[in-house]
Amino acid sequence: MEKQDIMINVDNVSMRFNLGIEKGFSIKQWFVDIGKHKKKPKNEFWALKNVDFSINRGEVVGFIGSNGAGKSTLLKVVAGVMKPTKGSIEVYGNICPMIELGAGFDSQLTARENIYLNGAVMGYSKDLIDSKFDEIVEFSELKDFLDVPVQNFSSGMVARLAFSIATIVEPEILIVDEILSVGDIAFQAKSEAKMMEMIGGGTTVLFVSHSIEQIKKMCNRVIWIEHGVVQKIGGKEVCDEYKKYMKNK
Amino acid sequence: MKVINNLKYTYKKYGFLLQQLVSRDFKVKYKRSVLGIVWSLLYPILMMAVMAVVFSNVFKFSTPGVSYLAYLLIGLTYFNYFSEASNLAMSSVVANFSLINKVYIPKYIFPLSKCLFVGINFLLTLIPLYVVIIATGTGLNWWHLLLPFSFVCLFLFTVGMGFILSTISVFLRDMFYIYGIVLTIWTYLTPIMYDISIINPTLQFIMKLNPMYQFINFARSIILYGNCPTLGQFAGCAVSALVIFFLGIFIFKKKQDKFIYYV
């Protein structure tokens, strides 16, 4: 394997969460704790344990596992949103995260304004959005609603707009977390076709889905994670093993 | 040199986002109101009118030799900027958690964009301020050209406070309530509606350590008294602004990777 073909290198990554602090810290608790000299034993939780793999250019990798297995955490670490507790991640190329679409929208702004705002959040330049604006509008099929505040949109329309913005550039690495089920049937088919086109164009895709059919259709490599540990890395046969595991659970 | 190159690169990459965030705040703020941006001009005037009635008629505050209205409005303009910007900056990180949790964006952009947004508003409030300066016969002088120095100091100080407050509020949500009270106390401890000379000299010394006093005093000596600020006044503004600014950067930078665990 050539060295320059590696796009993402995940090196022995572990991720620790502290369940105690998730609830936030309040001044009352602070006063309660102030007299105690010893810290309470921490309620630790390892969302990822020694995850180690690398992904090459152009690969479409599916991540499967039951709820709470650590898939989304792993994608967040890859996207740079979280820093791993242990280990390191190297990413060679620009990442376009499509984790839960529409996070960058402001519901009070119109679709037109949100295209610019969300585009900026994704790291696009003004020129790029200007030049791709029509394409985004056309793909989202929201031409008549451009000057309507997004809060009046249906959830399907919001998702369509977000998908159109997110996929307008061809990123080197695309992270997709359960989003292909957006919109109506026609738009689902269209977005899937768009994804396929991007995959064909050499984009490396990291793909999380609970739909085994989708994973089988799109991915050429599957990584199965359970309890934060990589169970198996391989081809589509991993899906069948995962299915068997889920049945016996 | 390396720092400058780094800043250039960062601006190139995130300048557009910053601009979008600021313009988003503007659009959202004025979208549904009839008077829109006129409110930014009216608000300080109305505040001034109310306070002038209360403090000069009821409490008989006065500022010998200069217009009380102008005196009051200078303090209000500066302090309103600080209280609004620092308040918005404080909640900006928590309010954007859904975004921070999904996309990598430098987190300092949120407090910074709030300080800029309120900063543009601040520049607008200079219009009513100058209207009052002229209407009260206070008059203009060339030293006014030095005023932007105090604007920059006020901005850096507020950004620094915004960094500190937003960091604390991530870990301690009670900060929103605490800071509301702190701000009220701060308003009264800053000589906005009264003259510092009515206070006894020992307390005066302590009150002069207040950075907000430094900035307001700087502006007043130019606008009201037509003096060039002393070297001490320049230093007072610059030092208090830079200390808090760099302290803010230091604290924010040190803690920002932990934010995500407190969502």
Image (cartoon, helix red, strand yellow):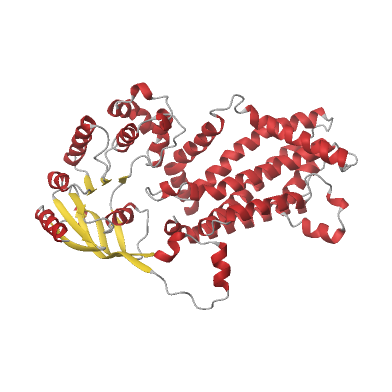
Query: In the picture, residue A183 is in which quadrant?
Result: top left
Q: Nearer the viewer, residue B102 or A211?
A: A211
B173 displayed left or right of B200: left
**How many labels, in total?**
0
Query: In the picture, residue B192 is in which quadrant?
Result: top right
Residue at figure coordinates x 33%, y 36% from the top left: A162
Measured as percent of width and height from the top left, residue B230 is found at 79, 50
Measured as percent of width and height from the top left, residue A190 is found at 21, 32
Residue B138 visible somewhere in the drawing:
yes
Quadrant containing the C terminus of chain B in the rendered view? bottom left
A62 displayed left or right of B213: left
Measured as percent of width and height from the top left, residue B214 is found at 74, 51
Q: Residue furthest front?
A: A248
Query: In the picture, residue B207 is in which quadrant?
Result: bottom right
Give the vertical position of A178 relative to B46 (above or below). Answer: below
Q: Residue furthest bottom?
A: A37
Q: Nearer the viewer, residue B7 or A144?
A: A144
Residue at figure coordinates x 54%, y 76% from the top left: A36
A200 displayed left or right of B206: left
Measured as percent of width and height from the top left, residue B71 is found at 80, 40
Residue B223 visible somewhere in the drawing:
no
Give the vertical position of A132 relative to B222 (above or below). Answer: above
A132 displayed left or right of A181: right
